[in-house]
């Protein structure tokens, strides 16, 4: 079953909605940035994501190849979503930034992001 999940940053300056299953399939990457921030990836099509509030509160960070766009709240520093290098046509939402009550975690699959180039093909396509 699909549901609309709400979420945002810690201070509330950034709020969004995302359409995704009630039971989430997440990935846990150990690359240099995901590991240190505890990011749990919920990858969706851009059309399934809606920024409701806080576009002016966001700052962007790019590193390495410069393809991924990591968006952070300028006030609290939380990265609640970003455009991933692996799926530049999608959005990765940090499941830890979703409001409780509309979802459960079905699986949390590890991803060897420290060897990203070798393993990126294992990520698969974005869900429909």
Image: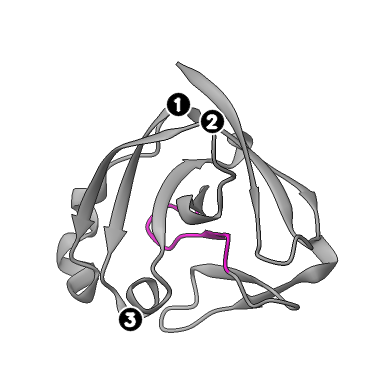
- Image position of 125 (left or right of 19): left
Q: Is residue 6 left or right of residue 83?
A: right
Look at the numbered disc 1 and give the secondary structure of its residue. loop
Identify whether 107 is placed above or below 35: above
Q: Position of residue 104 (x, y in %)?
A: 40, 34
Q: In the image, residue 21 lies at what x, y percent?
A: 45, 26
Q: Which mark, residue 32? A: 3
Q: How is the image coloured?
A: one colour
Q: Position of residue 33 (x, y in %)?
A: 39, 78
Alpha-carbon distance for marks 1 and 3? 29 Å
C-alpha distance separating marks 2 and 3: 30 Å
Q: Nearer the viewer, residue 102 or 116?
A: 102
Q: Nearer the viewer, mark 1 or mark 3?
A: 1
Magenta stretch, main secondary structure class = loop
Residue 14 position (above or below residue 5): below
Q: Earlier in the sequence, mark 1 or mark 3?
A: 1
What SS does tag 2 mark? loop
Q: Nearer the viewer, mark 2 or mark 3?
A: 2
Alpha carbons under labels 1 and 2: distance apart? 6 Å
| Residue at the extreme top | 1
* Residue highlighted by disc 2: 102
Q: Taking 62 as reference, is 126 above or below it?
A: above
Residue drawn at point x = 24 percent, y = 58 percent: 120
Q: Quadrant of residue 86?
A: bottom left
Rate crowding at label 1 as few (under 14), some (14 to 19) or many (20 or more) other CA atoms within 10 Å: some
Q: What residue sits right under mark 1 in the picture?
A: 22
Circles 1 and 2 in contact, beta carbons < 8 Å: yes
Q: Residue at x 39, y 38 (%)?
A: 126
Q: Quadrant of the C terminus?
A: top left
Q: Earlier in the sequence, mark 2 or mark 3?
A: 3
Q: Residue at x 54, y 30 (%)?
A: 102
Residue 84 drawn in magenta: yes
């Amino acid at each position: 079953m699909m549901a609309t999940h709400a979420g945002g940053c810690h201070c509330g300056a950034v709020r969004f909605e995302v359409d995704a299953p009630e039971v989430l399939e997440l990935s846990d990457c150990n690359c240099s940035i995901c590991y240190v921030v505890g990011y749990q990836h919920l990858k969706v099509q851009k059309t399934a994501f809606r920024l409701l509030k806080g576009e002016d509160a966001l700052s962007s960070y790019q590193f390495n190849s410069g393809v991924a766009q990591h968006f952070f709240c300028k006030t609290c520093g939380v990265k609640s979503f970003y455009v991933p290098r692996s799926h530049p046509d999608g959005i990765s939402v940090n499941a830890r930034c979703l409001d409780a009550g509309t979802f459960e975690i079905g699986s949390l699959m590890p991803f060897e992001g420290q060897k990203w180039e070798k393993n990126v093909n294992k990520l698969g396509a974005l869900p429909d």
